[in-house]
């Protein structure tokens, strides 16, 4: 890994063109690092309380978006508040595509989830490209202001197309859980009014394979027409929409016979407590980590759960998967030639142009990459929430991303992770303290943000490199080298 | 009036002034000349307080002013007309002038303004027009006028000839020289154009690479051919 | 057609407030060449202070004056927090710092006054005036807003063009070095600029408060509108800020009237994007030169 330290700007810029030592080696090394971290995280995930799994999921989700911020704000030097809006784009594209697709189960897994993520990513790339193209011409405050407008304006777009985008109330998502997922006791739990016709698919995952959950018999009788109308939020509940006794009285609603009982689980063709079915559903492809997990830890997974599936763990492993893939890409970009290009343009666009790098091209590419990551993070977020709406993706989210990256360390991927941890952990810490000391809600709700704001100012004034940058400069000073904490 | 003693100024590793000794007496024009990069502008900026010296002294009217802020130095009577057209184009002529003496009383300003208009009548004519409508020579007059509005005891002129026709430069400098004599003003003139500078100056100081090579009566310097060839390029 | 006129009339007082916010942004830009994104946060904070004063004393004028003073002080405080990175040439950091201040102010306001939207009682009636047998979309309060804005704008213009202080401030903004060489204490002028900007924003905040409820985040959208107006007018131009501030108010009123009020931020975003694309120096701004 090459480092540029203590050399003049022109030299460093020309090194960008010349230096390509064994990129293959570097990529393998990165893959190893990411792979090991991924495994460790999965191990962690499966041995902690599901509550912590949900934190892990959020941290992974934020980290995914933060990696984009590292590139955009840190390496490319463009202060943008648009990534929250781009997360919204990703989330909405994911929701729309996963809701309206036919299920294509492959290896028993919801293949359309992956496709939806791909589309989400594409959406991010497209929007990011457009915004980036405009942003490349803008300097500092103008860029910040435009992206500020984006952050405030994009959520407003959801109100423009309420039928499609769900308006203020957003869209309910059916998360494409893997086989046997979320079939908890009480089939009503999986009724999702927003997803007409989806019901069969979620409760019949990979049903073709081994005939588990012979669901068609159980749920086909459900008359969903009552719920169709609610997908149009403008329609509102009309009296005919309301369920009345009639609806319940007839045999085509949930009858006792429909509910999953011990019997259903006891028979060999349902999810068995011995975990073999889980293994067969999902684990046939040894490569999928989720399958591998469930294979290995199916016993612990199943403790206390009839269905054998813990939603938080799934969320976390999904989020971790995405985060690790993105981290791998980010690592290669940041520590490779492209990273040096971005930094070169940030530090001296004219010198960069002199050695043949296009400053605007580099700015746009930074935007596109960070938008891609943000969109993927948004898609993950949507799956964690099972819901997407404008409220979660407003200015506050974009500001949080900025806060995270500044505090963690602007130009460092590790800083991105630290920032993500901070964003999830600090509010919990404050909540805990508040519980102990009986602080009023007003204080508790706002304390994290107050801290964030003050810390951001303090960091900019005193330690512009954030946590990682400051530690790096200590290390460098100890080694006797001089380097700007912002590089 | 103005004196430097062993003045050393560096920009990072580059020594711009290396132990410079200079005396600028009242009532006459002292010209500092030398090639580009000799350290002339550095000298001016240090005297005016924009740059801090590494060592040495700057004495104004007997008192040390090294490290004093420029705005205070001006208020004490040392005014710099920096290099380039140092007028503010968006302000009017009158505003540019008024700016030079804002801290003074209205009547004091009025007296100074009369002096300036006397010296540079064109400024009176164009007093309500924006400074960017003036020609180069007129703007130089305005810049000097602004400095004069502070009622200086010592005036520093940094390369006033830049970008101006020689005739105009000569006119302006002769006016300044006359002012120096008549009002007992100390004038330090820094110039690349040695010919014109030495013509109006009483004393000439030749600067090369931050050090004084020779100083003496202007006529002597301008007639010293070897010196001129070596350091002044003609 | 009557609808059109109604929407226009209704938009003036909103536009006036946007103009004041845009003015504040421009004032800061002119003195220190940076955009203070915390400006609306400051205005929000001082408006809460004004609310408290009004609720306890019932005196609107007193509340306005207190807000004004608080705004100046807050402006100076934020100046000191945010200007240091600029001095060290970390312009990215300066932008980030203003956002940090914004976040902190919003959180602080939430802590002190709670997040529930509060109502602000206007000093005079906010109902439409009845003239000639018709209810117009202009109320006494609207007229008051316009009057206060006009007084403020005229006052600032006079300050800048006629007074020594104004001249010092303009010179400090145009060319700090020449200003210093003319004896101007430039740093003090910068601080004064921020103080005036803070006061202007504070007044804007108090004026807009009765039109809806205030909460820590309610001014966010105003930031977008004010920034849009300031940029379109050319960040250097006070006239531009006022003109396009009012213009933005009118446009928003029309948009809200003819379609949905939720469309307003989208329209603002589009206008901003177009302007940045086509005329990055603004309508009244010129590259390299500025005007009052």
Image (cartoon, rainbow, N blue to C red):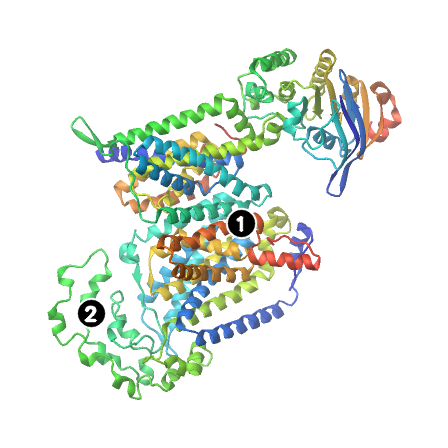
Q: Position of residue B149 (x, y in %)?
A: 62, 18
Comparing B51 with A28, the one in front is B51
Of B172 and C127, the residue lying toward us: C127
Where does label 1 land, which residue? A458
Residue at image x 62%, y 58%? A472
At mark 2, the secondary structure is: loop
Q: Residues within 10 Å of mark 2 (few under 14, many from 20)?
A: some
Chain of the residue on which disc 1 is drawn: A
Left or right: residue C115 versus residue C179 is left
Gap between marks 2 and 1 measured at Cα: 56 Å
Query: Residue A340, how many percent across, how many down?
Result: 60, 57
Q: Chain of mark 2?
A: A
Front tag of 2 and 1: 1
Is A298 situated above or below A386?
A: below
Asked if one can make out residue B33 in the rendered structure from this viewpoint, the answer is: yes
Where is residue B48? Give x, y as percent: 69, 28
From this viewpoint, is residue A82 visible? no
Q: Looking at the rendering, in which quadrant would you find the C terminus of chain B?
A: top right
| A252 shown above or below C217 | below
Identify which residue is drawn at 59% across, 43% down: C89
Q: Secondary structure at mark 1?
A: helix
**Mark 1 surroundings: few (<14), some (14-19) or many (≥20) residues within 10 A:** some
Q: Nearer the viewer, residue C72 or B28?
A: C72
Residue ranking furthest to the bottom: A268
Q: Are marks 2 and 1 on the same chain?
A: yes
Q: Which residue is mark 2?
A: A224
Task: Residue C54 in the image: state x and y as whole percent.
Answer: 32, 36
User: Where C192 falls versus A300 (above or below)?
Assistant: above
Which image quarter holds the N terminus of chain B? top right
Q: Horizontal placement of A354 versus A208: left or right?
A: right
Q: In the image, is A211 to the left or to the right of B75? A: left
């Amino acid at each position: 890994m090459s480092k540029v330290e203590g050399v003049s700007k022109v030299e460093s810029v020309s090194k960008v063109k010349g230096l390509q030592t064994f990129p293959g080696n570097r990529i393998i090394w990165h893959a190893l690092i990411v792979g090991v971290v991924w495994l460790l995280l999965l191990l962690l995930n499966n041995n902690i309380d599901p509550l912590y799994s949900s934190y892990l999921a959020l941290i992974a989700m934020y980290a995914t978006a933060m990696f984009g911020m590292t590139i955009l704000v840190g390496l490319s030097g463009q202060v943008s508040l648009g990534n929250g809006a781009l997360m919204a784009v990703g989330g909405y594209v994911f929701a729309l595509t996963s809701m309206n697709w036919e299920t294509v189960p492959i290896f028993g897994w919801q293949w359309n989830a992956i496709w939806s993520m791909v589309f989400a990513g594409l959406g991010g790339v497209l929007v990011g490209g457009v915004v980036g193209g405009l942003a490349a011409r803008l300097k500092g405050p103008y860029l910040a202001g435009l992206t500020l407008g984006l952050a405030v304006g994009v959520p407003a777009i959801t109100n423009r197309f309420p039928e499609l985008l769900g308006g203020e109330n957003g869209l309910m998502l059916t998360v494409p859980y893997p086989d046997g997922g979320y079939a908890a006791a009480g089939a009503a739990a999986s009724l999702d009014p927003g997803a007409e016709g989806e019901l069969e698919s979620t409760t019949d995952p990979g049903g073709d394979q081994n005939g588990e959950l012979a669901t068609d018999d159980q749920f086909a009788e459900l008359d969903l027409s009552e719920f169709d109308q609610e997908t149009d939020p403008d329609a509102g509940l009309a009296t005919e929409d309301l369920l009345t006794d009639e609806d319940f009285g007839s045999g085509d609603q949930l009858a006792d016979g429909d509910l999953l009982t011990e019997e259903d689980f006891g028979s060999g063709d349902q999810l068995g407590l011995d975990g073999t079915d889980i293994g067969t559903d999902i684990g046939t492809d040894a490569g999928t980590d989720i399958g591998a997990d469930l294979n290995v830890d199916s016993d612990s997974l199943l403790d206390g759960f009839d269905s054998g599936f813990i939603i938080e763990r799934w969320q976390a492993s999904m989020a971790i998967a995405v985060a690790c893939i993105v981290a791998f890409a980010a690592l290669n970009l940041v520590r490779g030639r492209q990273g040096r290009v971005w930094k070169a343009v940030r530090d001296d666009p004219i010198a960069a142009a002199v050695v043949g790098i296009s400053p605007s091209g580099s700015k746009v590419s930074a935007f596109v990459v960070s938008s891609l990551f943000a969109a993927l993070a948004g898609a993950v977020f949507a799956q964690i929430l099972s819901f997407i709406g404008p409220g979660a993706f407003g200015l506050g989210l974009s500001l949080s991303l900025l806060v995270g990256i500044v505090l963690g360390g602007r130009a460092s991927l590790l800083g991105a992770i630290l920032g993500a941890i901070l964003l999830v952990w600090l509010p919990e810490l404050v909540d805990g303290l508040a519980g102990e000391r009986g602080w009023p809600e007003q204080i508790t709700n706002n304390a994290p943000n107050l801290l964030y704001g003050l810390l951001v100012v303090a960091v900019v004034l005193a330690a512009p490199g954030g946590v990682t940058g400051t530690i790096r400069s200590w290390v460098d000073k100890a080694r006797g080298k001089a380097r700007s904490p912002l590089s | 009036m103005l004196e430097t003693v062993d003045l050393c100024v560096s920009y990072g590793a580059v020594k711009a002034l290396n132990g410079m000794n200079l005396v600028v007496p009242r009532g006459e024009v002292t010209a500092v000349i030398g090639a580009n990069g000799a350290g002339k502008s550095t000298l001016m900026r240090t005297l005016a307080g924009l740059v801090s010296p590494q060592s040495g002294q700057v004495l104004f009217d007997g008192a040390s002013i090294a490290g004093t802020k420029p705005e205070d130095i001006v208020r004490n009577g040392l005014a710099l007309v920096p290099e380039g057209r140092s007028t503010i184009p968006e302000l009017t002529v009158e505003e540019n002038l008024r700016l030079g003496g804002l801290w003074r009383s209205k009547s004091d300003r009025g007296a100074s303004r009369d002096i300036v208009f006397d010296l540079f009548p064109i400024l009176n004519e164009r007093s309500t027009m924006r400074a960017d409508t003036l020609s180069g020579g007129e703007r130089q007059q305005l810049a000097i006028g602004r400095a004069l509005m502070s009622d200086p005891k010592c005036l520093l002129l940094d390369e006033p000839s830049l970008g101006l026709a020689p005739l105009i430069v000569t006119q302006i400098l002769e006016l300044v020289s006359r002012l120096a004599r008549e009002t007992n003003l100390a004038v330090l003139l820094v110039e690349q154009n040695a010919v014109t500078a030495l013509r109006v100056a009483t004393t000439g100081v030749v600067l090369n690479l931050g050090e004084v090579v020779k100083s003496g009566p202007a006529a002597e310097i301008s007639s010293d051919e070897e010196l001129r060839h070596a350091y002044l390029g003609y | 057609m009557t609808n059109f006129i109604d929407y226009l009339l209704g938009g003036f007082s909103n536009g006036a407030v946007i103009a004041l916010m845009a003015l504040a942004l421009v004032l800061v830009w002119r003195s220190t060449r940076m955009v203070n994104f915390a400006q609306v946060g400051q205005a929000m904070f001082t408006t809460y202070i004004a609310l408290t004063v009004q609720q306890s004393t019932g005196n609107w004028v007193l509340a306005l004056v207190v807000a004004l003073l608080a705004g100046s002080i807050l402006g100076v405080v934020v100046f000191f927090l945010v200007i240091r990175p600029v001095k060290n040439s970390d312009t990215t950091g300066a932008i980030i710092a203003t956002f940090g201040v914004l976040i902190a102010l919003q959180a602080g306001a939430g802590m002190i006054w709670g997040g529930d939207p509060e109502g602000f009682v206007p000093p005079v009636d906010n109902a439409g005036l009845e003239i000639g047998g018709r209810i117009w979309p202009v109320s006494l309060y609207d007229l008051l807003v316009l009057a206060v804005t006009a007084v403020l704008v005229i006052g600032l213009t006079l300050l800048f063009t006629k007074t020594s202080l104004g001249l010092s401030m303009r010179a400090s903004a145009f060319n700090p070095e020449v200003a210093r060489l003319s004896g101007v204490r430039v740093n003090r002028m910068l601080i004064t600029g921020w103080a005036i900007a803070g006061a202007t924003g504070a007044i804007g905040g108090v004026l807009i408060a009765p039109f809806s409820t205030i909460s820590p985040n309610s001014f966010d959208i105003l930031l977008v509108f004010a920034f849009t107006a300031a940029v379109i007018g050319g960040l250097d131009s006070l006239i531009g800020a006022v003109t396009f501030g009012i213009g933005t108010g009118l446009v928003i009123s029309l948009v809200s009237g003819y379609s949905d009020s939720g469309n307003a931020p989208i329209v603002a975003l589009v206008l901003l994007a177009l302007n940045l694309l086509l005329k990055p120096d603004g309508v009244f701004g010129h590259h390299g030169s500025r005007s009052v």
